[in-house]
Structures are given as C-alpha cells and as structure tokens.
Image: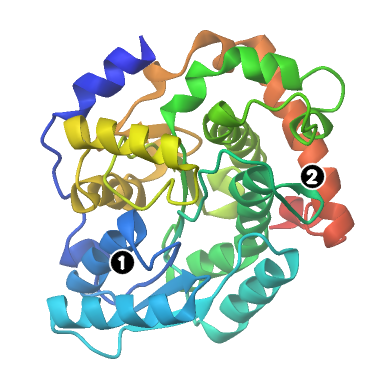
C-alpha cells in the first residue's frame, strides 16, 4: 500500500503555496542546502523576498557556489549567508545552534533537511553514521533551536515552523524496526552484526519520525508557539545516495529516471511545510497536503505510541549526556 501510494503521488502536479506575502522580510535556515531539495527550497525563499536565508552546509565551498547560483537566478544579493554545519558532529551542531541563536534577530522557519543515505558501515560520535546524522543530531539541532524559535514567535507575533524531512519508505521496514527493539533501541541500531544496511536509510527515517512525533507532542503550540511538522517530499532527483556503493547508486538512478520529481518540484512540499500552519503540528505532510491517513496503524496505535516514547526516552538521555539541560529546558519554553 505504501509503495502504491508513493508511486501514484509521484505524478501529481504540485502547487507552490509559499509566496511573497508569506515570506517577505523573514529569516530562514535550511540545512543540507548546497544542492538538491535544500538548494531549491532556499532559492524559492530568496525569490519570495525573505530578508535572510542561511545555507547550513558541511562543505563551505559548495555552499558558496550555491549562494552564487541563487543570487544569479533570483537577482537578489545580500540575502543568502553560508554557515558551516557538520551533522556528524555534536560540537558542530552545538556551535551552529549557538551562532544562530545569538547572531540572528529572528528565525521564522527552520528546515532540517540534511541527511545521508549510505549502505556501508561507518560511525560518527560512537554511533552508526546514518543514525547519528539522520536521527540523533537532527533531533539535537531541533531541540537546541527551540528556544530561539519560540523567542522569535513571541517577539514578532508569529508562529515559527520547524520542518523535519522524513520518508514514507520508513513504513516499509517494520520488520527491521522490530529487530532493533530487542533491548535498547539505539544499541540495536548500533549493532553491526544485526544491521541490514540496504534498508538502513528507511529505518533511520522511521526512527526519526517517531522521535519527531514525541518531540512535537512535548512541545505543544499553545505553550511554545512553534509549529513542528514532518514533510515527506517523495522520490526526487537529488544527490542523496551519492555515498552509497556503486550497485545501490545504479539501482536508485534507474528508479529515479522512471519516476522521480525534480528537486525544484520536491522543494514545493517543503515550502508547504513552512506555510501549512498550526493544523500541521505533529503531522505528516506530503504532496503539499497533510497526509496523516498514510501513517500505518502500527505507528499510530497504542503500540506505536509506546515505540515513539521509548525512542524519545533513549534519545533524550543521550542528548542530555552531550549537553546537560537541553531536554529539560523544553518544558520551560
């Protein structure tokens, strides 16, 4: 059912729901924005008269090239800033969050787009690389940005949006999730002998979604003033998977050639996430619509609730070890 829905969705024409009236004078941060979905999202935001768009990138040279590309296509200079962010490093995430919180007057939208698709084992910060990047540090960055996002909302009388990029492919790997739940979830994910790296990307996106759902539930709009949602852009022609083995890359390229959206069309789903409003809080969005009905029962039912709470409990403990107080401060926002 998941793949049938995804395939049918790929061929639908998507609207651009953001515009100058929604973006004028605002400040946005887009991670992983030197190429692909992040680049095209940033380009649209500049085009729609945002006052500041931060490209958060690991490779500063690539980021500067992206900046020049955006300036050339939009005719607007002095809007894009390029900041360093390595999502495989706790210290880099902490430094970025501190810089954003102190140097930016406001943040109206934050797009947590950066991610990796790899099918061979490597580690970062003592954890398998894709778990570290796609789950742990992605949520870490979101947690650290919450005080600034909430402050921006109070100061300027708006509701900033924190958008996490997920994938409905996560719904296809229930059996892998079940294997990882034997004991500690994150210890299971970090067991190389048990890891099926061909399905690792999908699994990390499922774990990310579960964590984001609990994160959003603990940060209600009524208290924080921040909208937290999840966008599944669908299959798009981007550089995702460039670090995979040759066979995997060939397979993905063949599928993309048949049915992938362009990165620009895919970015429209992210723009929707930024303007979807309060009704999108804690929700899955895809195809420029709220798609909670896509979420399988085993994710949304009582057992699924226990799963997401378990994932969050373990994740929160890890993040508290890295930066004591970062989780407890969420209840004070």
Label 1: state its secondary structure: helix
Q: Relative to 62, is 47 on the left or the right? A: left
**Numbered label attached to residue 316:** 2
Residue placed farthest to the front in the image?
246
Q: Position of residue 305 (x, y in %)?
A: 67, 19
Give the answer, above or below, for where 7 lies relative to 62: above
Q: Quadrant of residue 290?
A: top left
User: Decide: marks 2, 1 in contact (CB < 8 A)?
Assistant: no
**Numbered label attached to residue 158:** none
Looking at the image, tell me whether mark 2 or mark 1 is earlier in sequence order: 1
Residue drawn at point x = 19 percent, y = 69 percent: 48
Residue drawn at point x = 68 percent, y = 42 percent: 121
Q: Quadrant of residue 120?
A: top right
Q: Relative to 309, is 167 on the left or the right? A: left
Q: Position of residue 220 (x, y in %)?
A: 59, 42
Give the answer, above or below, for where 205 lies relative to 150: above
Q: Position of residue 41 (x, y in %)?
A: 29, 60
Residue placed farthest to the left in the image?
13
- Label 1 CA crowd tier, 10 Å (few <14, some 14–19, many 20+): many
**Residue at the spot of label 1:** 42
Q: Quadrant of the N terminus?
A: top left
Give the answer, above or below, for where 241 lies relative to 321: above
Give the answer, above or below, for where 188 lies relative to 215: above
Q: Quadrant of the C terminus?
A: bottom right
């Amino acid at each position: 059912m998941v793949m049938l829905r995804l395939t049918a969705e790929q061929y639908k024409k998507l609207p651009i729901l953001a515009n100058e009236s929604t973006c004028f004078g605002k400040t946005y941060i887009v991670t992983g924005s030197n190429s692909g979905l992040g680049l095209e999202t940033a380009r649209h935001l500049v085009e729609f008269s945002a006052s500041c768009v931060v490209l958060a990138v690991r490779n500063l040279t690539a980021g500067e090239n992206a900046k020049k590309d955006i300036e050339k296509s939009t005719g607007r200079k002095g809007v894009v800033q390029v900041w360093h962010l390595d999502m495989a490093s706790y210290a880099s995430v902490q430094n970025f969050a501190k810089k954003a919180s102190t140097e930016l007057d406001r943040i109206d939208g934050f797009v947590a787009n950066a991610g990796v698709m790899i099918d061979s084992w490597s580690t970062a910060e003592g954890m398998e690389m894709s778990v570290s990047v796609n789950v742990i540090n992605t949520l870490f960055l979101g947690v650290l940005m919450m005080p600034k996002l909430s402050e921006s909302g109070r100061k300027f009388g708006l509701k900033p949006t924190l958008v996490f990029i997920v994938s409905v492919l996560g719904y296809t790997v229930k059996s892998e999730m079940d294997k990882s739940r034997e004991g500690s979830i994150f210890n299971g994910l970090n067991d190389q002998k048990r890891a099926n790296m061909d399905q690792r990307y999908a699994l990390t996106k499922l774990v990310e979604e579960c964590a984001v759902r609990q994160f959003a539930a603990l940060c209600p709009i009524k208290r924080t003033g921040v909208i937290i949602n999840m966008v599944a852009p669908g299959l798009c022609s981007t550089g995702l998977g460039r670090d995979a083995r040759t066979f995997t890359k060939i397979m993905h390229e063949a599928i993309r050639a048949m049915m992938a959206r362009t990165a620009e069309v895919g970015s429209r789903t992210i723009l929707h996430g930024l303007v979807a409003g309060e009704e999108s809080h804690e929700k899955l969005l895809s195809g420029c619509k709220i798609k909670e009905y896509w979420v399988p029962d085993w994710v949304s039912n009582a057992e699924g609730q226990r799963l997401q709470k378990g994932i969050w409990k373990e994740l929160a403990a890890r993040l508290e070890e890295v930066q004591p107080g970062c989780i407890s401060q969420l209840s004070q926002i």
